[in-house]
Image (tube, coloured by chain):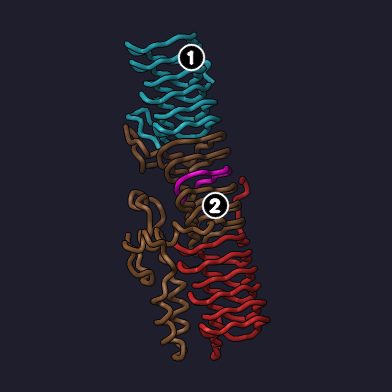
């Protein structure tokens, strides 16, 4: 599967009026514009867009957050917090990018163990 | 299926109470109460009203039917039909506009992981 | 290359669950949902569920419309219509005023349409809710001609032909409010 770090082009999109209470797992990119509570476990990338609210532990390859995340993030490659995002939780990834304007509270572990 | 030479027609004003059996095709425009057992095609026209258990090879319903249906090939419930009962057939078609209340038993092949 | 049939970027009302995604839990929302992967639990939508051929829903579903081309194990309740296309397979109960089973669909369970007073008028006049036009990837509905079949069959017997024309003009009773806008029932042309 091609890795897509580009403009949030993905086959799976959780639209803004959708609320999911449960576990999501899969082997493709996921874009969240709505609300997810529970657990997210992907082999590819997770994009939490501006309207997205995630209250879940996240385990993926890459994570890009522009919305709200409350939960621990465990990424095998990279975590990117864009400006205007709000993240509360621990982040564990070999590469982390926190943009100016991002709001973050938690621990960071870049010990490159990833997953 | 074999298109039999004979087609029986039960006209609009006719009411039959009892058992109907036969090897030919049958078109019902009137009213039948009881039991129907056909080897071929039963058509219930839009003026037809059947209150019976039906056994046939193929069933085409444009009118009213109430009872259990056992078809060996196909049941077609068309848009003007009103059907109540349990249907057992390998193929069942319900057209937009039909009214159906009851159960349908077709063979459903599910994937192993469901 | 996996293409993006439903692009993101502000396209509200374009929720797609891709083929490798599994969701276990409760899903609810106010937009159309296309499922190509697997959803287990509960699905509640105020709009339309499109279950594509690769999709599996093992859940109780409560929606406005459902178009099922994949596998459903569970009960489906719809306020407008449920359609099983020719690849659709379902085990469970359906409760909806309009239910369509296309030739080739498999179904086992109960269907409750009630007296479906909605179904007669809406089905005859509209044919399809507007959603279909927005779904290029949904399988096109083949117009089932069981009527034509019966007609064709009967026509070969000359005695039956005149009776048929009489039957054609008889239409089911229509609630008076809708009768005004109603055309003849009989012509089964699907306007798309």
Q: Colour of chain B?
A: red
The residue wearing badge 2 is: C95
Quarter of the figure with residue A100: top left
Q: Chain of mark 2?
A: C
Residue at the spot 41% in from the left edge and 14% down from the top edge? A96
State whether discs 1 and 2 lie on one chain. no
Name, please, the residue furthest toward the front: C176
Q: Is residue B15 magenta?
A: no
Quadrant position of the C terminus of chain C in the picture: bottom left
Mark 1 vs mark 2: give the one in front.
2
Q: Colour of chain C?
A: brown
The residue wearing badge 1 is: A91
In the rendered image, residue A75, in percent from the top left (x then y), is placed at 48, 21
Question: Is B75 placed above or below A102 here?
Answer: below
The answer to whether residue B71 is seen in the rendering is yes
Residue at the spot 48% in from the left edge and 59% down from the top edge? C100
Please tell me whether the stretch drawn in magenta is mainly helix, strand or loop: strand
**Left or right of A80 in this view: A115:** right
Disc 1/disc 2 C-alpha distance (Å): 46 Å
Frontmost residue, C64 versus A46: C64
Question: Where are the magenta residues, as a range?
Answer: C55-66
Frontmost residue, C183 versus C108: C183
Q: Which chain, by letter, is cyan?
A: A
Residue at the spot 43% in from the left edge and 46% down from the top edge? C48
For disc 1, the neighbor class at 10 Å (few under 14, some 14 to 19, many from 20) is many
Q: Secondary structure at mark 1?
A: strand
């Amino acid at each position: 599967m091609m890795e897509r770090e580009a403009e949030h082009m993905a086959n799976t999109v959780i639209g803004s009026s959708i609320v999911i209470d449960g576990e999501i797992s899969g082997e493709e990119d996921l874009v969240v514009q709505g609300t997810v509570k529970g657990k997210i476990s992907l082999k590819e990338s997770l994009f939490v867009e501006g309207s997205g609210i995630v209250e879940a532990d996240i385990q993926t390859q890459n994570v890009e957050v522009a919305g709200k995340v409350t939960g621990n993030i465990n990424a095998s490659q990279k975590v990117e917090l864009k400006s205007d995002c709000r993240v509360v939780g621990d982040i564990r990834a070999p590469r982390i990018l926190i943009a100016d304007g991002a709001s973050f509270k938690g621990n960071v572990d870049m010990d490159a163990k990833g997953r | 299926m074999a298109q039999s030479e004979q087609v029986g027609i039960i006209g609009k004003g006719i009411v039959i109470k009892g058992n109907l059996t036969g090897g030919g095709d049958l078109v019902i425009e009137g009213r039948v109460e009881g039991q129907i057992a056909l080897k071929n095609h039963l058509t219930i026209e839009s003026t037809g009203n059947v209150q019976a258990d039906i056994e046939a090879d193929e069933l085409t319903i444009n009118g009213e039917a109430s009872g259990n249906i056992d078809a060996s090939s196909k049941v077609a419930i068309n848009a003007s039909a009103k059907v109540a009962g349990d249907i057992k057939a390998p193929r069942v078609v319900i057209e937009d506009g039909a009214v159906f209340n009851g159960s349908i038993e077709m063979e459903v092949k599910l994937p192993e992981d469901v | 290359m996996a293409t993006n049939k439903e692009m993101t970027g502000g396209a509200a009302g374009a929720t797609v669950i891709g083929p490798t995604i599994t969701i276990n839990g409760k899903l609810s929302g106010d937009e159309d949902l296309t499922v190509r992967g697997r959803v287990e639990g509960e699905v509640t939508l105020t709009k339309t569920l499109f279950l594509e051929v690769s999709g599996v829903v093992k859940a109780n579903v409560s929606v406005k419309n459902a178009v099922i081309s994949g596998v459903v194990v569970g009960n489906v309740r719809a306020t407008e219509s449920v359609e099983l296309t020719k690849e659709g397979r379902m085990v469970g109960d359906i409760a909806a005023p309009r239910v369509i089973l296309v030739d080739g669909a498999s179904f086992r369970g109960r269907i409750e349409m009630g007296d479906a007073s909605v179904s007669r008028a809406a089905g005859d006049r509209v044919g399809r809710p507007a959603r279909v036009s927005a779904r290029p990837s949904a399988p096109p509905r083949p117009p089932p001609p069981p009527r034509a079949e019966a007609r064709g069959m009967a026509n070969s017997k000359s005695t039956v032909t005149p009776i048929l024309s009489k039957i054609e003009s008889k239409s089911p009773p229509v609630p008076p409010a809708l009768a005004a806008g109603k055309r003849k029932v009989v012509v089964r042309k699907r306007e798309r």
